[in-house]
Amino acid sequence: DLNDYAGISHGAGETAWASAPPVLTVRHFQQYEDHDFLNDVLRNHIKWVEFLNREFDNVIGSAMKEKRGDSTEISGLGDWLALRSRDTYLTHSSFYMASARAVAYIAHMMGNDQMQRKGMAAAKKIRDKIASLYLMNGKDNFD
C-alpha cells in the first residue's frame, strides 16, 4: 500500500508516478517495437485511465476549487514540478492527459480503434480544461 497524499489513488500513489507505466510503455515500444508487451499491458493501462476518468474531477477538481487551489492546500508533485508552489492541479492534470494519450497510442498500435478514440477523447477533455483554466484568462499566459 503506497502512500497517497492527494487521496485520489486509493493507495496507488500520486497521479504522476502512477502515470509513469503507460508513458514508459510507449517509449519502450518506440525503442523495441515489442507488440507482445503492448498486448500484455494495455488492459492495465486502460483500467488506470478509466479510474482517472471516473475519479479525477471528483477528488482533485473539487479540492482545487475549480481554479489552481490558491486557498486549498493539496498534496502532490507540485512541490517540485508545478509552476507554482501550491498548484498541483496542473501537474496532476498533465499526467492524466499523458496517460490518456499513451493509452490511445498503444491502442492504435494494437489496432483497437475504439480504445484509441476513448483515450484521445479523455486527453482532449483534460487539455481543454487546462486551457480554460490557465490560458483563456484574457492574457494567454499562466498568470
Image: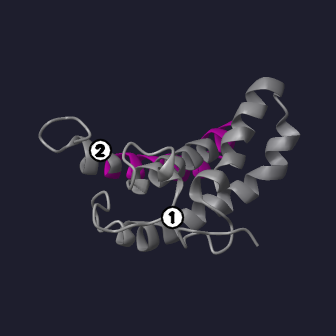
Q: Residues within 10 Å of mark 1 (few under 14, many from 20)?
A: some
Q: Amino acid at mark 2?
A: Ala
Q: Residue at position x 69%, y 55% from top?
A: 45
> At 51% across and 64% down in the image, what residue appears?
53
Give the residue drawn at x 73%, y 68%. 2
Horizontal and vertical percent position of residue 124: 41, 46
Picture coordinates of residue 46, whole percent (x, y): 66, 57
- Residue 118 inside the magenta-drawn segment: yes
- Which residue in the structure is indicated by mark 2? 131
- Where residue 13 sits, quadrant-wise, is bottom right
Quadrant where the C terminus lies? Answer: top left
> Does residue 101 appear to the left or right of 128 in the view shown?
right
Near mark 2 (Cα within 10 A), the count class, few <14, some 14-19 or many ≥20, is: some
Q: Quadrant of residue 72?
A: bottom left
Q: Residue at x 49, y 63 (%)?
A: 75
Cα distance in 3D space between marks 1 and 2? 18 Å
Residue extending farthest right: 36
Q: Which residue is mark 1?
A: 53
Spot the residue most to the left.
138
**Residue 1 percent across, percent down from the top left:** 76, 73
Q: Is residue 137 above or below residue 4?
A: above
Is most of the magenta stretch helix, strand or loop?
A: helix
Query: Which of the two marks, 1 or 2, is nearer to us in this view?
Result: 2
Residue lying at the far top in this picture: please name it: 31
Please tell me which of labels 1 and 2 falls first in the chain: 1
Say what secondary structure mark 2 lies in.
Answer: helix
Q: Which residues are magenta?
A: 105-129
Amino acid beneath label 1: Asn
